[in-house]
Image (cartoon, helix red, strand yellow):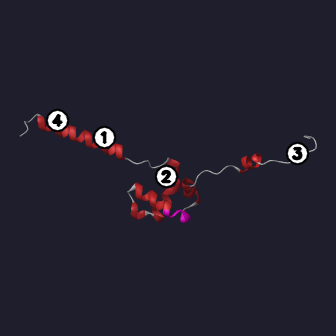
Amino acid sequence: MYGPTKLPNILVLALVFSVGEAAAQQEYRGTEQQQTACTPDVFRLCWSEIPNVTQIVACLVREKPRLSEGCRAVFEPPRQASHVRHRLRRHPATEAEK
């Protein structure tokens, strides 16, 4: 069996490893702004998945048509601004440019 000084050392090592592993397993939860945008939708649509972050994200993706505008924007790729698209179109040359 372990002596009186060995047991506390083993417990300390086990605690250090378990805390380190838990920190490594934490999932990315989005920015504070994204969390703020989606929190009402999580409580409205995905409350049964709390606190499982992976399942919450899957639920939000599945419920995308029902998400608020702010939360939906978190899950949609950014769109080009209309002025950028406008500038990329070719315009016919004006008389001055010919």
Q: State the residue in front, 62 or 2.
A: 62
Q: Quadrant of residue 53?
A: bottom left
Kindly report which numbered mark, 1 or 3, lies closer to the viewer in this rendering: 3
Q: Quadrant of residue 66?
A: bottom right
Dot 3 or dot 4, earlier in sequence: 4
As drawn, the label of residue 81 is: none
Task: Specify the farthest residue to the right.
Answer: 95
Dot 1 or dot 2, earlier in sequence: 1
10 Å crowding of disc 4: few (<14), some (14-19), many (20+) = few
* Tag 2 residue: 35
- Mark 4 falls on what kind of element? helix
- The CA span between labels 3 and 4 is 81 Å
Is 14 part of what is drawn in magenta?
Answer: no
* Tag 3 residue: 93
Kindly report which numbered mark, 1 or 2, lies closer to the viewer in this rendering: 1
- The CA span between labels 1 and 3 is 64 Å
Kindly report which numbered mark, 3 or 4, lies closer to the viewer in this rendering: 3
Q: Quadrant of the N terminus?
A: top left
User: Residue at position x 30%, y 43% from top?
Assistant: 21
* Range covered by the magenta-colored residues: 62-66
Q: Amino acid at mark 1?
A: Gly
- The CA span between labels 3 and 2 is 48 Å
- Tell me residue 4's x, y (percent): 8, 36
As drawn, the label of residue 9 is: 4
Dot 1 or dot 4, earlier in sequence: 4
- Tell me residue 69's x, y (percent): 59, 59
As drawn, the label of residue 20 is: 1
- Mark 1 falls on what kind of element? helix
Dot 1 or dot 3, earlier in sequence: 1
Q: Amino acid at mark 2?
A: Gln
- The CA span between labels 4 and 2 is 40 Å
